Image (cartoon, grey):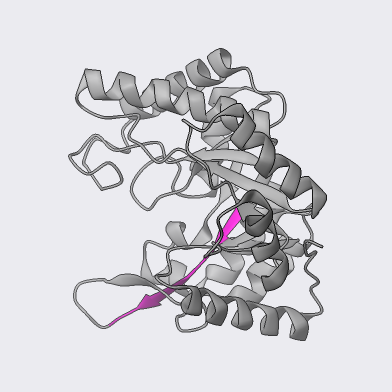
């Protein structure tokens, strides 16, 4: 397993790789935009290889379900380019969310979880993979609380329907915690998800969630170690996978990432879970 998080204050590819080495990370977010030149990409590929740093993921982060057909097509074209970039740099995966039918690209909408939207998610995913033809990476959909896929069963349904060897799984258990009972069963959910989907898992996001007393139900994302999520169970489940990146996200500062990583390392040490670091 390889711990990772964003790094700061670098100018060159070598400085970027060394920033990960200094933090003891073994995996990295891909830092360059899709407009980067091949020479620029090669510098980061070389630096990552030199320091045995795994590129965990290339993010797309746009709305493939946009209600505007012009925007939707532009997003599709961009997504295909990002998959091709991920393939070229050898990222473990290229990741997006399936998208929303509403005005917010990542927000809830009554149509997001319908059968019609399911079919469109499958069709678009197949189209992207058939056009991009990746051989060194996998396209993945990060789970969200209010769109496909949102849990283990819907993830299995998408995998079966897409039916492409280059389609895999990006894990974000916290995004699946969308009810109070799931808050208190997060360890069970983590164990089952990682066990059932082990052959498909390419990268993991690690966060925390907190159930508050705000009515009616309010679940907030928070700093790892300050919420209700069972990180011990996720660490144990992830440690059984094949050298998977374990990536912190959504924190505001380097200091916050340092705190989150220190907490995860402490829990891992207690559990006897080992992280592979860059050198």
Q: Would you say residue 156 sits in the magenta stretch?
A: no
User: Is residue 76 something that shows in the picture?
Assistant: yes
* Image height of 148 relative to 177, above or below: above
Q: Quadrant of the C terminus?
A: bottom right
Residue 207: horizontal and vertical position, in percent? 50, 68
Q: Quadrant of residue 202?
A: top right
* Image height of 93 relative to 187, above or below: above
Residue 36: horizontal and vertical position, in percent? 51, 33
Left or right: 141 in relation to 16? left
Q: Quadrant of residue 2?
A: bottom right
Q: Nearer the viewer, residue 67 or 252?
A: 252
Q: Residue at x 72, y 50 (%)?
A: 54
Residue 49: horizontal and vertical position, in percent? 79, 46
Q: Quadrant of residue 271?
A: bottom right
Which SS does the magenta portion mostly show? strand
Left or right: 243 in relation to 223? right
Q: Quadrant of the N terminus?
A: bottom right
Q: Residue at x 45, y 81 (%)?
A: 227
Q: Nearer the viewer, residue 53 or 2?
A: 53
Residue 174: horizontal and vertical position, in percent? 47, 63
User: Is residue 167 something that shows in the picture?
Assistant: no
* Image height of 250 relative to 114, above or below: below
Q: Would you say residue 205 sits in the magenta stretch?
A: yes
Q: Which residues are magenta?
A: 204-212
Looking at the rendered structure, the number of numbered marks drawn on it comes to 0
Q: Residue at x 46, y 48 (%)?
A: 143
Q: Nearer the viewer, residue 19 or 144?
A: 19
């Amino acid at each position: 397993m390889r711990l990772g998080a964003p790094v700061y204050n670098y100018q060159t590819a070598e400085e970027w790789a060394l920033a990960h080495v200094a933090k003891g990370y073994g995996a990295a977010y891909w830092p360059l935009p899709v407009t980067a030149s091949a020479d620029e990409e090669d510098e980061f590929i070389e630096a990552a290889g030199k320091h045995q740093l795994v590129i965990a993921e290339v993010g797309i982060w746009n709305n493939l379900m946009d209600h505007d057909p012009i925007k939707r097509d532009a997003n599709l074209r961009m997504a295909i380019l990002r998959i091709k970039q991920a393939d070229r740099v050898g990222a473990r995966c290229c990741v997006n969310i399936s998208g929303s039918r509403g005005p917010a690209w990542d927000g809830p909408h009554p149509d997001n979880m319908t059968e019609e939207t399911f079919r469109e998610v499958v069709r678009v995913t197949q189209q992207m993979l058939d056009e991009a033809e990746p051989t060194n990476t996998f396209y993945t959909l990060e789970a969200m609380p209010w769109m496909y896929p949102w849990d283990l069963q819907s993830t299995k349904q998408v995998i079966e329907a897409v039916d492409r060897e280059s389609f895999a799984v990006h894990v974000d258990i916290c995004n699946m915690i969308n009810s109070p009972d799931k808050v208190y069963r997060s360890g069970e959910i983590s164990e089952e998800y990682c066990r059932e989907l082990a052959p498909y898992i390419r990268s993991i996001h690690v966060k925390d969630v907190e159930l508050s007393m705000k009515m009616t139900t309010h679940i907030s994302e928070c700093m790892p170690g300050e919420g209700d999520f069972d990180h011990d169970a996720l660490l144990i489940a992830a440690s059984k996978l094949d050298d998977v990146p374990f990536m912190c996200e959504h924190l505001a500062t380097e200091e916050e990432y340092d705190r989150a990583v220190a907490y995860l390392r402490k829990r891992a040490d207690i559990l006897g879970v080992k992280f592979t670091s860059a050198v």
